[in-house]
Amino acid sequence: MTTYSNTMKHIREKHGDSLEDLSEKVKVSVEELAEIENGESTPSLKLIRDFAVVYNESLSHFIGEDPDETDEENSKYEKWLPFINQMEQKGVSPEYLIELLQQAGQAGDTQDKE
C-alpha cells in the first residue's frame, strides 16, 4: 500500500465512512476509491484536496510533512475549510464572495461619509 492509500483509508475509517459514503462526498466512483486504497492507483490532486476538505484534515498528511510541524502555520487556513466546503456545496464561487465583500466595503465607505 502507498502512503496515500494508507492515509485515506485510515482517515475514512476514523470517520466511520464506507467507500460508498466517501464516493458520494467526493463525487468519485467506489471502484476508483477502492483502487486507490488498494494501492493500485494514485489519487488526483483534486481528489486529495476534496478528501481533505470533506474530513477537515491537513493536506500535510498527503505530502509527507509532519503535521505537528505544519499545523500551527496551516491552522489559520484550515479553520476556513468547512466554510469553503459549504460555500462550494451551495454553488458560491470565490469571485462572488470577493464581489460581495467589495460591495460591502463600498457601502461601508458611503455610510462613513454620511
Image (cartoon, rainbow, N blue to C red):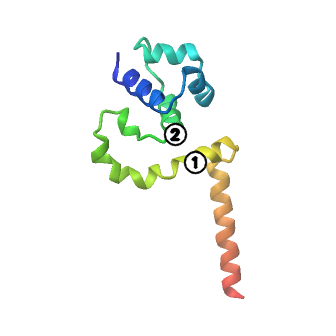
Amino acid type at circle 1 is Ile
Residue 86 locus on image (x, y percent): 63, 46
Question: From the viewer's perspective, is residue 48 above or below residue 101?
Answer: above
Residue 54 locus on image (x, y percent): 54, 37
Image quadrant in which you'd find residue 30: top right
Q: Is residue 62 left or right of residue 69?
A: right
Image quadrant in which you'd find residue 101: bottom right
Q: Is residue 18 left or right of residue 74?
A: right
Q: Which residue is mark 2?
A: 53
Mark 2–mark 1 CB contact (< 8 Å): yes
For the C terminus, which image quadrant? Answer: bottom right
Residue 50 locus on image (x, y percent): 53, 34
Label 1 CA crowd tier, 10 Å (few <14, some 14–19, many 20+): some
- Determine the secondary structure under disc 1: helix
The mark nearer the N terminus, 2 or 1, is 2
21 or 45: nearer the eye?
21
The label shown at residue 84 is 1
